[in-house]
Amino acid sequence: MEFRHLGNGQTFPPVAPNGRGYAIPVTQENYVEIFCLTPEGIVGSSVAANWAEITGFYYDDKSWEIILRNYTGRGMRFRRGHPCFMVAEGGESILTSTQGYSIPLCTMNRISFEKTKNPCQKPA
C-alpha cells in the first residue's frame, strides 16, 4: 500500500493517531480501553508490542483483530457492528473516524504505514 502525505499531518489512506482506542472485545459485552497507539507500537491490557511484533490484522463481518507475534491465541479481537472510538493523544474529543474512515480501518492502515517505514516488517 502506498501512503501519500496530504499536509497538516494527514495521509491517505488515513492512519489512526497516537492515543487510546475503545471497543468491545469479542469475549465481553461492554466497551473497554483496548489499546494505546504510541510511536513505538501498541499497548493493551497485559499486551505490549512494538510495530515489528505485529504480524498482521484481520477484518470480517463479525470482528476485527490485531495479530501479535508474541501473543498467539490471545490476539486483540473486537466486535464489529459497534463503533470503535479513539481519544487522540493530547486531545479530549472522541473520534469515531479519521477523514471519514472508521477507527478499525485507520488502525489497520497505521500498522501498514508503520511497516512501510521499515520494509523488513510486512503485515499479513
Image: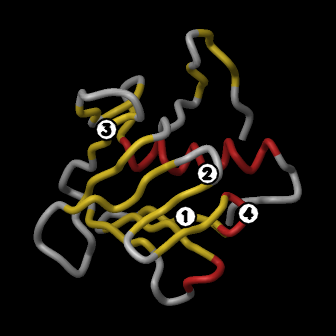
Dot label at residue 52: 4
Sooner in the amino-acid sequence: mark 1 or mark 4 = 4
Which amino acid type is shown beneath numbered disc 3?
Val
CB within 8 Å, label 4 to label 2: no
Q: Given this view, does label 3 or label 1 mark the residue nearer the observer?
A: 3
Q: What residue type is labelled 4?
A: Ala
The residue wearing badge 2 is 111
Residue at the top extreme, as displayed: 7
- Which residue appears at 55% of the width and 72% of the height? 67
What's the CA distance linking mark 1 and mark 2? Answer: 8 Å
Tag on residue 57?
A: 1
Local crowd at mark 4 within 10 Å, few (<14), some, or many (≥20)? Answer: some
The residue at the far front in this view is: 90
Looking at the rendered structure, the kind of residue marked 1 is Phe
| Horizontal relation, residue 29 to residue 76: left or right | left
Label 3 crowd bin: few (<14), some (14–19), many (20+), radius 10 Å: some
Q: Mark 1 touching mark 2, by CB under 8 A?
A: yes
Q: Where is residue 24 in the image (x, y as percent from the top left)?
A: 22, 64
Q: Earlier in the sequence, mark 4 or mark 2?
A: 4
22 shown above or below 90: below
Q: Residue furthest bottom?
A: 73
Crowd class of label 2 (few under 14; some 14 to 19; many from 20; radius 10 Å): many
Give the mark nearest the N terminus, 3 or 1.
Answer: 1
- The image shows residue 100 at horizontal and vertical percentages of 36, 26
Q: Name the residue under label 3.
A: 87
Q: Which of marks 1 and 2 is nearer the N terminus?
A: 1
Residue at the extreme right: 120
Residue 96's spot in the image, x, y percent? 27, 36
Nearest to the eye among marks 4 and 2: give it.
4
Query: In this rendering, is residue 96 above or below 51?
Result: above
Is 28 in front, or is 64? Answer: 28
For image coordinates 64% across by 66% down, the residue present is 54
